[in-house]
């Protein structure tokens, strides 16, 4: 996740900015840069790679003199991790420098507009439009220029702005992306999180969305979006560096669970334009799509389960047969695959060895590969015929959470886009699905909020030697991911079964007190799953059900129920998985497990 820092004072800015960037390294990044205003104007130093490399290049900042500056660590989204794409970006007249955290959703149209006016672009980033807008709107007054520029931006952004005409002054702007101002004595700072500030000051001002601030060594002035000065309270930072890295959460996994509304928004919002799903990176014509007579999804681990969950939406909306196959199996299966197969390859890291091998095998047979990947510039992203990034930001906990839900979000967009182009999705159904898609970030937040009882439930279930997860259809896919999450981080044996299969063997393992997690979010099949709940209860099971809010039927059948907001069944896995993640998390916490780094597991499995 990108990180930004800013400093104005009397000390040399560069070394302080580099120190701040080091504190933000934990967020994950692939390039870094600083811009400092000195006697000769703004000087930018940026590189792909680590902050350490930037320190070497700048002699720990000594080579970039000046006492006002901004810095950035970049996690690539728009454009590969290269020197040119790294921030800060500089305007063509060299008078403006910008660092940005977030995504400018309307960057494509702004870039077109500015290019038509003769503006030259030097990077592939969405951010670069901002610096050229600043130059374009330059009215001699920095505050007015910043306001005019910001008024043109759609999306999420935390911005740091430096202007050569205003030594000692920085502007910081916040919209749907965190930004904190550090209040010092004779110097002031900003940063995207408090880790970069705590070594310098414990006094902070938290900007709200739509607000912006002017920082000088002497003081900080905060404005609302209309430019009116407002009073903001100064808060005391109580976190140490370690707590700050995790945003105050006990573990990265919990932080990443909580980040899901924002992550899913980042995956979806830029791809919805005027009521249409727009996938620029996979912009096939209906004729080209009709060439595919089969879709094969391949992946490993949770990415495979995301494929299992989304295959129902893909099949239902495109009416093309879909199968999901584990990459480690597909690569040796002598699969019947040819140029009429669309291969969907899902991977958070983009580096999983089995997934890469399965993709190569299928492409050698003529299949064309569409990758759904989080890490920009990774092997899978570079090798596939097309790549849709999930834009989840870096995931630090080994057990994936926002990686999985953003994969689902992108797969749902894909299903809708393909179904629409193929003419197999009528307007009414499309409108209903679109309505749910637009609400997804909010619904995910609601699902998190509805789960307040999970820590107490975890106390009930944490000492079970074994748990079962059941469900049908989309619910079964969620049960698979639920059992995996539980195994991964709590080390408790957990099995997932298609509920209808229980009586073919597994039910023999149900004893007095055996916990069974029953996912019941597929309304058409709920009665069927309830009959399985009745079967296991008759053998002594304790049933924890996950169901849509307002479902009264389930309350009388299960011992405990966790509710999620109602949504179209095809999209329900993205909400139903939230209680699974939280349950695994709190059970593991209850059992004192090393949640972020579970034993024997790796975040990225680059060997077979
Ligand atoms: C590892 C991770 C899982 C992940 C799987 C596939 O096992 O611990 O969280 O689902 O690899 O990784 P990928 O990066 O390809 O999604």
Image: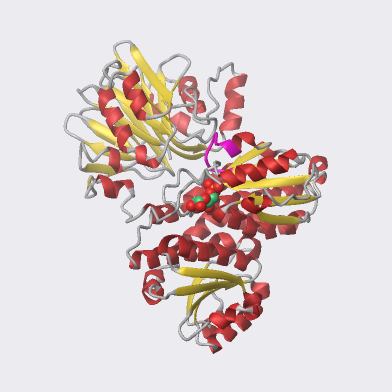
Does any portion of residue 251 appear in the rendered image?
A: yes
Residue 5: image location, x then y, percent: 33, 33
Residue 79, placed above or below residue 65:
below
| Residue at the spot 68% in from the left edge and 50% down from the top edge | 332
Nearest to the observer: residue 265 or residue 246? 246
Counting the numbered discs, the total is 0
Nearest to the observer: residue 516 or residue 598? 598
Q: Is residue 567 left or right of residue 243?
A: right
Does any portion of residue 278 appear in the rendered image?
A: no
Residue 476, placed above or below residue 355:
below
Place residue 219 in its image quadrant. top left
Residue 314: image location, x then y, percent: 70, 55
Q: Is residue 507 left or right of residue 39?
A: right
Nearest to the observer: residue 7 or residue 601? 601
| Residue at the spot 39% in from the left edge and 41% down from the top edge | 27
Residue 351, placed above or below residue 478:
above
In the image, the segment drawn in magenta is 373-380
| Residue at the spot 44% in from the left edge and 65% down from the top edge | 584
Residue farthest bottom in this picture: 538
Magenta segment, prevailing SS (helix, strand or loop):
loop
Residue 396, placed above or below residue 151:
below
Residue farthest top in this picture: 40
* Quarter of the figure that contains the N terminus: top left
Nearest to the observer: residue 193 or residue 28? 28
Residue 368: image location, x then y, percent: 73, 40
| Residue at the spot 78% in from the left edge and 54% down from the top edge | 320
Residue 185, magenta (yes or no): no
Residue 41: image location, x then y, percent: 34, 13
Residue farthest left in this picture: 185
């Amino acid at each position: 996740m990108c990180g930004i820092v800013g400093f104005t004072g009397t000390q040399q800015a560069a070394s302080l900015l580099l120190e701040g960037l080091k504190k933000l390294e934990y967020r994950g990044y692939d390039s870094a840069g600083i811009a400092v205003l000195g006697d000769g104007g703004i000087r930018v130093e940026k590189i792909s790679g680590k902050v350490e490399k930037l320190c070497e290049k700048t002699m720990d900042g000594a080579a970039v003199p000046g006492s006002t500056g901004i810095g950035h660590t970049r996690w690539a989204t728009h454009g590969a991790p290269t020197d040119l794409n790294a921030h800060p970006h500089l305007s063509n007249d060299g008078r403006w420098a910008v660092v940005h955290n977030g995504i400018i959703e309307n960057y494509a149209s702004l870039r077109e507009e500015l290019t038509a006016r003769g503006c030259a672009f030097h990077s592939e980033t969405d951010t670069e439009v901002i610096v050229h807008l600043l130059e374009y709107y330059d009215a001699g007054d920095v505050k007015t220029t910043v306001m005019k520029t910001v008024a043109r931006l759609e999306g999420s952004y935390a911005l740091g702005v430096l202007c050569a005409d205003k030594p000692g002054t920085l502007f910081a702007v916040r919209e749907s992306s965190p930004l904190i101002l550090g209040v010092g004595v004779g110097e002031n700072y900003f940063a995207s999180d408090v880790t970069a500030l705590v070594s310098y000051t414990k006094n902070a001002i938290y900007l709200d969305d739509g607000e912006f601030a002017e920082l000088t060594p002497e003081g900080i002035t905060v404005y609302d979006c209309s430019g009116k000065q407002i009073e903001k309270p100064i808060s005391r930072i109580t976190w140490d560096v370690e707590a700050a890295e995790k945003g105050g959460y006990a573990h990265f996994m919990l932080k990443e669970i909580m980040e899901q509304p924002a992550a899913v928004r980042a995956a979806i919002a830029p791809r919805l334009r005027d009521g249409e799903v727009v996938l620029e990176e996979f912009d096939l014509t209906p004729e080209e799509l009709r060439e595919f007579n089969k879709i094969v999804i391949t992946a490993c681990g949770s990415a495979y389960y995301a494929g299992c969950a989304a295959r129902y939406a893909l099949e239902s909306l495109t009416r093309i047969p879909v199968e999901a196959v584990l990459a480690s199996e597909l690569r040796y299966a002598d699969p019947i695959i040819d140029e009429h197969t669309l291969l969907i390859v899902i991977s958070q890291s983009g580096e999983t060895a089995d997934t890469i091998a399965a993709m190569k095998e299928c492409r050698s047979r003529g299949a064309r590969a569409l990758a759904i990947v989080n890490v920009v510039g990774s092997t899978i992203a570079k090798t596939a015929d097309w790549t849709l990034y999930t834009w989840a930001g870096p995931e630090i906990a080994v057990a994936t959470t926002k990686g999985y839900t953003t994969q689902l979000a992108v797969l749902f967009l894909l299903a809708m886009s393909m179904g629409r182009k193929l003419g197999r999705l009528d307007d009414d159904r499309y409108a209903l699905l679109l309505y749910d898609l637009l609400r997804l970030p909010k619904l995910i937040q609601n699902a998190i909020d509805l789960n307040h009882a999970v820590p107490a439930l975890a106390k009930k279930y944490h000492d079970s030697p074994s748990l079962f997860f059941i469900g049908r259809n989309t619910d079964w896919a969620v049960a698979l991911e639920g059992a995996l999450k539980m195994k991964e981080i709590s080390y408790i044996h957990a099995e997932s079964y298609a509920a209808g299969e229980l009586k073919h063997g597994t039910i023999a393992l149900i004893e007095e007190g055996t916990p069974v997690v029953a996912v019941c979010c597929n309304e058409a099949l709920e009665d069927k799953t309830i009959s399985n709940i009745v079967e296991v209860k008759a053998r002594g099971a304790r049933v924890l059900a996950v169901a849509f809010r307002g479902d009264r039927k389930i309350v009388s059948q299960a011992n405990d129920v966790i509710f999620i907001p109602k949504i179209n069944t095809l999209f329900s896995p993205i909400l139903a998985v939230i209680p699974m993640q939280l349950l695994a998390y709190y059970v593991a916490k209850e059992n004192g497990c090393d949640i972020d780094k579970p034993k024997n597991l790796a975040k990225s499995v680059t060997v077979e």
